[in-house]
Image: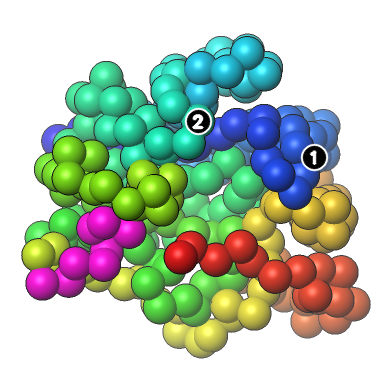
């Protein structure tokens, strides 16, 4: 059984173009995301799925420099990109990670994957009912469910956001949600705006030099120690899926 983590990445962010290659403690945001995803012991292979656009050649070059395989696909039809990437790398189970999550905790990924494996699910995530901070987002689903979504989904938001076709059909698919023991969903540690970048840089500068694989709990402890961190991007609203 092959478990493939597919990290989607592109340079064309509307609110913060080029964000995934911005510097963070001596490496790119993408490099941090890759390092943390690869640290999850349950993953067979980690790959980057980018687009065929010329501006995304920089992502391909960065990924290859980091020793990561790359798949190039559609910019807007991300479902297609995931399906063809998963097919190319012969995935039985797919983990979907976005490249704007450089603080993602490998233990959260592992917990989500184990939940999926132990329950004979079609889809498991930690976002169906949010309790984890944004930036810990992990989705795990079978290649079979991905294939059905690819062949059957027709709505544009289903193609753009990859998994709505699956998780909006609980009567068809067995869904699971991983929850944290307390609600920490007010925290936003994903990268989409300059304010997000400022916060992520502050967190990384405080933790990364001492422990490169710092945990979610260590970040939460920082907010107890430095409550002013929360206000840096507290006013930023997430672009919601329709």
Mark before the other along the chain sequence, 1 or 2: 1
Of marks 1 and 2, the one in the foreground: 2
The 10 Å Cα crowd at callout 1, few under 14, some 14 to 19, many 20 or more, is many
* Residue positioned 71% across, 44% down in the render: 14
| Disc 1: which residue | 24
Q: Position of residue 22 (x, y in %)?
A: 79, 35
Residue 147, image quadrant: top left
- Residue at image point 52% right, 72% down: 132
Q: Is residue 43 above or below residue 187?
A: above
- Can the viewer see residue 108? yes
Tell me if mark 2 has few (under 14), some (14-19) or many (20+) residues whose alpha carbon lies within 10 angstroms of its own. some
Q: Quadrant of the N terminus?
A: top left
Q: Is residue 214 visible?
A: no
Taking the spot 60% from the left edge, 31% from the top edge, the residue there is 10
Label 1 vs label 2: CA separation? 25 Å
Residue 89: which numbered mark, if any?
none
Q: Nearer the viewer, residue 205 or 165?
A: 165
Find residue 75 and name its label.
Answer: 2
What secondary structure is marked by label 1?
Answer: strand
Residue at image x 29%, y 26%?
A: 84
């Amino acid at each position: 059984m092959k478990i493939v983590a597919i990290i989607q990445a592109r340079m064309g962010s509307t609110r913060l173009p080029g964000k995934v290659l911005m510097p963070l403690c001596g490496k790119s945001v993408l490099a941090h995301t890759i390092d943390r995803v690869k640290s999850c012991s349950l993953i067979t292979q980690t790959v980057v799925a980018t687009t065929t656009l010329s501006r995304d050649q920089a992502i391909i070059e960065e990924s290859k420099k980091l020793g990561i395989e790359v798949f190039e696909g559609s910019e807007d039809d991300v479902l297609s990109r995931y399906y063809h990437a998963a097919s190319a790398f012969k995935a039985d189970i797919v983990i979907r990670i976005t490249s704007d999550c450089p603080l993602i905790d490998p233990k959260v990924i592992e917990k989500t994957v184990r939940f999926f494996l132990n329950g004979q699910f079609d889809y498991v995530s930690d976002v169906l009912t949010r309790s984890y901070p944004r930036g810990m987002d992990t989705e795990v689903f079978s290649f079979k469910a991905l294939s059905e979504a690819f062949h059957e989904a027709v709505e544009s938001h289903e193609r753009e956001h990859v998994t709505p076709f699956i998780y909006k059909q609980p009567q068809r698919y067995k869904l699971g949600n991983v929850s944290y023991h307390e609600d920490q969903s007010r925290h936003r540690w994903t990268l989409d705006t300059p304010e997000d970048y400022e916060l992520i840089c502050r967190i990384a500068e405080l933790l990364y030099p001492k422990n490169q694989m710092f945990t979610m709990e260590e970040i939460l402890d920082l907010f107890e120690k430095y409550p002013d961190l929360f206000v840096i991007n507290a006013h930023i609203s997430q672009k919601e899926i329709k």
